[in-house]
Image: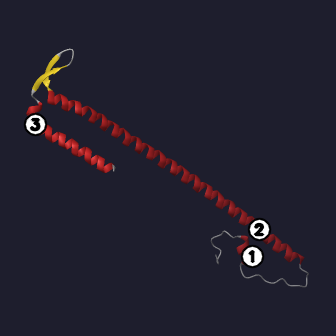
Amino acid sequence: MKNAINLLAWISMGLVAALAALNWPTLLATSPINLVVTEVHLPLGLLMLALAAVPLALFFVAYLHQQIRTLMETRHLLMEVKRAHELADKAEASRVEALRQLLTSEFLAINERLDSVGALRPAGVAAPSPPAGLRHMLSAPWRSDVKGH
């Protein structure tokens, strides 16, 4: 729709320019013009063309103002989206950190319980051996050098 209106405006301006160019001698012919208070001799066609150019210039200025305002609003919204994205990233990072701390504390509590259960075992009973590396994995769950993750 916007492209059709722009195309129609350019076509109409082209037609006016073509008619003015083809009839330039007629546009420059002077004629008496009554201004209520006085009468002047001016080219009426040139006067009418100038009077038509004034609204066109005002329309062009209004169009540019609207485009600039739209670009500024788009820039403002883009900055707001960027700020919201950064805030969401920070919130997600804090949630991940809180979850990491919770899991670390839970693994430490499990290790302490395992140690206390092992201490309560009678002296003659041997503790079953855990799978190789399980205690190491439970004590350092977030280390990247632990195999098996």
Q: Residues within 10 Å of mark 3 (few under 14, many from 20)?
A: few
Where is residue 34, by image quadrant? top left
**Nearer the observer, 89 or 123:** 89
Q: What is the spatial separation of the Cα atoms under label 2 and label 3, in whole angstroms?
A: 95 Å
| Numbered badge on residue 135 | 1
Residue at x-position 47% and y-position 45%? 76
Q: Residues within 10 Å of mark 2 (few under 14, many from 20)?
A: some
Where is residue 133, by image quadrant? bottom right
Give the answer, above or below, for where 53 lies relative to 124: above
* Amino acid carrying mark 3 in the image: Asn
Residue at x-position 15% and y-position 30%? 45
Where is residue 66, by image quadrant? top left
Percent coordinates x, y for residue 85 in the rendering = 54, 54
Q: Residues within 10 Å of mark 1 (few under 14, many from 20)?
A: few
| Numbered badge on residue 108 | 2
**Nearer the observer, 85 or 96:** 85
| Numbered badge on residue 23 | 3
Percent coordinates x, y for residue 48 in the rendering = 19, 30
* Amino acid carrying mark 1 in the image: Arg
Q: What is the spatial separation of the Cα atoms under label 1 and label 3, in whole angstroms?
A: 99 Å
- What element does badge 1 sit on? helix
